[in-house]
Amino acid sequence: MFSRFGRFGQWLCLLAASVAATLLFRAIELPGALLLGPMAAGILLAVNGAELAMPRFAYNLAQAVVGTMIAAAVTPDILRTFAADWPLFLVVILSSIAASGVTGWALCHWRVLPGSAAIWGSSPGAASAMVLMAEEFGADVRIVAFMQYLRVLCVALTAALLARFYVGVDHAAAAQNWLSLRDPRAIAETLALIVGGLALGRVLRVPSGALLLPLAAGAVLRGLGLIDLELPQPLLAAAFAAIGWVVGLRFTGDILKTVAMKLPHMLASILTLMAFCTGIAWTLTQFLGIDMLTAYLATSPGGADSIAIIAAATNVDLGFVMAFQTARLILVIVIGPILARRVARAMGHRPIPR
């Protein structure tokens, strides 16, 4: 349907559909509308023949903006909480990684998906690393990427709906003046942090560095009182839209046809992992005395940037949520590929000789 419009026409259709979907979601007060609207528009166009893909630099820039937004929410109190309860944090995060390994093993053991695709696709994060390693083992990288982004989509939608009906939208945040520039110096420092984080990420080649490096540097520099952070609202909206498009445009008609027969199994494994993480979230409320929504967003399996956007639009402790999500992301980057590789080898899959 959309393929006949040409590349420029498709982008215009995507932009128009994104605006319409965002306005609809905002009208029903769905948290994260600036993310979910473009995501829904991307899915609509992708399944109807559009052939679009976000440029890698634009996606990295969007992640850097979200990383900076998270850095502005990380306070010394959050870091003290994390330091005081780090054994609990570690056990919870490792439990979710282990649970994802079990679901991947089960899908592979029962031959629900071909080869070792289920093992790599079940990891709760580090999507790019998993896709690269899946290719090394000869797995279908389309299925791996689809599983990764299907989980992100499910987590984002569930989190937004829970936030909407559990506590509602943070109207104070939603009423911000988009054109206000309260502190030009802070904005300049913020933009410098984004550019510097992107440049450092290209040099160091850290997995998810576009998100993690501005987050870490911004949190440290702000904590030391060396910089102030303020992001213009239009820049945030553009970053949210870019991340939504990256997820939505992955759901092409071709890949949906490829996985159509296996889609119920994929959804069952994702929902099982989400249910397990919900149980972990309830455990956190008992030990730390935090509210259930904050705990749920903190323990959601994957999509740290998406969760950050939704948490920022609700009355939850964004700093706590992102301290947990960031720690999980780091551990998944370090442990996830090792665990997936070992499970794949245990199932009899071997890397393809180069």
Image: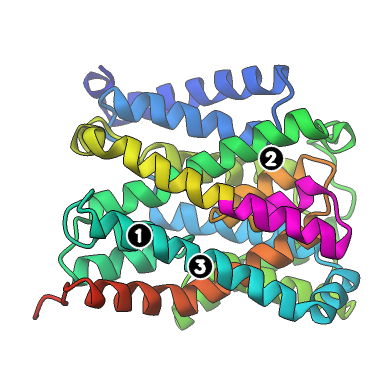
Is disc 2 placed on a helix, strand or loop?
helix
Amino acid on which the number 2 mark rests in the picture? Pro
Residue for badge 1: 104
Q: CA distance from mark 3 to mark 2?
A: 35 Å
Q: Residue visible at 21% across and 66% down?
A: 135
Q: Nearer the viewer, residue 224 or 140?
A: 140
Label annotation for residue 234: 2
Q: Is residue 123 shown to the viewer in this render? A: no
Q: Is residue 315 above or below residue 105?
A: above
Query: Nearer the N terminus, badge 2 or badge 1?
Result: 1
Q: Is residue 97 above or below residue 153?
A: below
Magenta stretch in the rendered image: 276-298
Q: Sort mark 3 into few (<14), some (14-19) or many (20+) by Cα contacts within 10 Å.
A: many
Q: Residue visible at 58% across and 64% down?
A: 211
Residue for badge 3: 97
Is disc 3 placed on a helix, strand or loop?
helix
Where is residue 218 drawn, in percent x and y? 74, 71
Q: Nearer the viewer, residue 114 or 56?
A: 114
Nearest to viewer (mark 2 / mark 1): 1
Left or right of residue 259, residue 173 in this image:
right
Where is residue 73 drawn, in percent x and y? 81, 60
Query: Nearer the N terminus, badge 3 or badge 2?
Result: 3
Query: Nearer the N terminus, badge 3 or badge 1?
Result: 3
